[in-house]
């Protein structure tokens, strides 16, 4: 539903399900003038996060706050803005797993936009980082789940392993970019299947209805290491592909957990968007799929670092 927030922005789209609150994308609008604040990426981050914090407090009778955010997506319009956006977020809280996506433009000419979901008992969530290798690609996952295990979120990165989050724009040579694109273009349908199976295995880990049943591990050589810490055009980039869901499931499938995946891909890095969609669709029909999956495929200019070319944000909850 839409909630007027005249001291924040014209309106805020919210969805509340049990203890979970979804907050639509927020940008750095100055309340009095409804214009984007001046001062560049730093000031825009500060104001946007203030908006999110106030919305969280308004929606939670127990005094919600930014620390209640479990997962979020931060859209920026240039790769160099990711550093400041991450810095501003982590100054306020380190509880959430945030994915950073570079897009060509944002509403009102904003430089940054955050969309998040929060849980009123975020302090009861655990955190895990895992990783493996699938073929030539490095897979890394960050996962959060609550003690009851009725809510879990995940961010999975598929990368060529040629750069890190600290790699600077000036360090990206033509040879590096060519090698990255060549390697990304070689990804196969089987690699995509193994990646989604790995995502599901972690997202459904210890799920009550699937005891003893989990997607098989990636068929490629992979070592799962865990550490519990606590061809497209510019106009294609601007329009995300609509959510796609499998046909209505037979009654035997109704007991399967429902999962939503948002699949971001770096434009021009993968063979084609149709290839990616076909790979996901074929996985839905495979024996490795033990969930009811709705998914969205979304193009991006760049992802969280320069070697990542696919990013998957997943959510499973049954409150």
Image (tube, grey):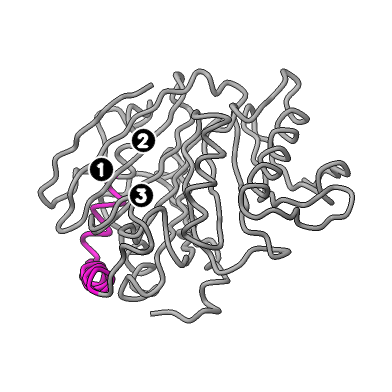
- How far apart are the two marked residues, 3 and 2, measured between alpha carbons? 28 Å
Residue bearing mark 3 = 165
Query: Where 104 sits versus 140, above or below?
Result: below
- The kind of secondary structure element at disc 2 is loop
Tags 1 and 2 touching, CB below 8 Å: yes
Mark 3 vs mark 2: give the one in front.
3
Neighbor class of circle 1 (other Cα within 10 Å; few <14, some 14-19, many 20+) is many
> Foreground: 20 or 166?
166
Q: Is the magenta region chiefly helix, strand or loop?
A: helix
* Residue 154 quadrant: top left
Q: Residue 213, percent across and down?
A: 26, 35
Neighbor class of circle 3 (other Cα within 10 Å; few <14, some 14-19, many 20+) is few
Residue located at (85% from left, 47% from top): 31
- How far apart are the two marked residues, 1 and 2, measured between alpha carbons? 9 Å
Mark 3 vs mark 1: give the one in front.
3
- The kind of secondary structure element at disc 3 is loop
Query: Where 6 sits versus 146, above or below?
Result: below
> Foreground: 287 or 112?
112
**N-terminal of the two: label 3 or label 1?**
3
**N-terminal of the two: label 3 or label 2?**
3
> Foreground: 100 or 218?
100
Mark number, residue 204: 2
User: Where the C terminus falls, by quadrant?
Assistant: top right
Span colored in magenta: 175-198
Residue bearing mark 1 = 215
Q: Does residue 264 show up magenta in the picture?
A: no
Residue located at (72% from left, 20% from top): 63
- How far apart are the two marked residues, 3 and 1, measured between alpha carbons? 30 Å
* Residue 216 quadrant: top left
Mark number, residue 178: none
Residue located at (46% from left, 37% from top): 97
Answer left or right for 218 relative to 22: left
């Amino acid at each position: 539903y839409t909630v007027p927030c005249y001291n924040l922005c014209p309106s805020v789209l919210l969805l509340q399900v049990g203890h979970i609150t979804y907050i639509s994308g927020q940008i750095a609008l100055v309340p009095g003038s409804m214009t984007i604040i001046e001062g560049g990426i730093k000031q825009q981050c500060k104001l946007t996060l203030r908006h999110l914090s106030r919305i969280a407090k308004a929606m939670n009778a127990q005094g919600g706050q930014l620390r209640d955010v479990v997962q979020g997506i931060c859209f920026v319009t240039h790769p160099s803005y990711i550093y400041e956006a991450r810095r501003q977020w982590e100054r306020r809280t380190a509880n959430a797993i945030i994915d950073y996506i570079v897009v060509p433009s944002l509403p009102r000419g904003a430089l940054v936009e955050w969309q998040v979901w929060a849980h009123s008992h975020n302090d009861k969530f655990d955190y895990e980082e895992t990783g493996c290798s699938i073929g030539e690609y490095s897979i890394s996952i960050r996962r959060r789940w609550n003690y009851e295990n009725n809510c879990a979120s995940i961010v999975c990165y598929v990368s060529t392993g040629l750069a890190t989050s600290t790699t600077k724009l000036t360090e990206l040579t033509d040879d590096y970019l060519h090698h990255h694109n060549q390697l990304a273009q070689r990804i196969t349908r089987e690699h995509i299947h193994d990646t989604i199976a790995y995502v599901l295995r972690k997202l459904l880990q210890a799920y009550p209805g699937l005891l003893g049943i989990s997607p098989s591990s990636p068929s490629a050589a992979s070592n799962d290491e865990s550490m519990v810490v606590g061809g497209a055009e510019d106009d294609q980039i601007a329009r995300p592909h609509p959510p796609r869901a499998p046909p209505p499931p037979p009654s035997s499938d109704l007991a399967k957990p429902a999962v939503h995946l948002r699949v971001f891909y770096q434009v021009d890095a993968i063979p084609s968007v149709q290839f990616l969609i076909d790979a996901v669709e074929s996985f839905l029909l495979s024996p490795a799929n033990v969930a009811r999956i709705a998914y969205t495929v979304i193009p991006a200019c760049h992802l969280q670092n320069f070697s990542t070319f696919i990013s998957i944000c997943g959510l499973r909850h049954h409150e």
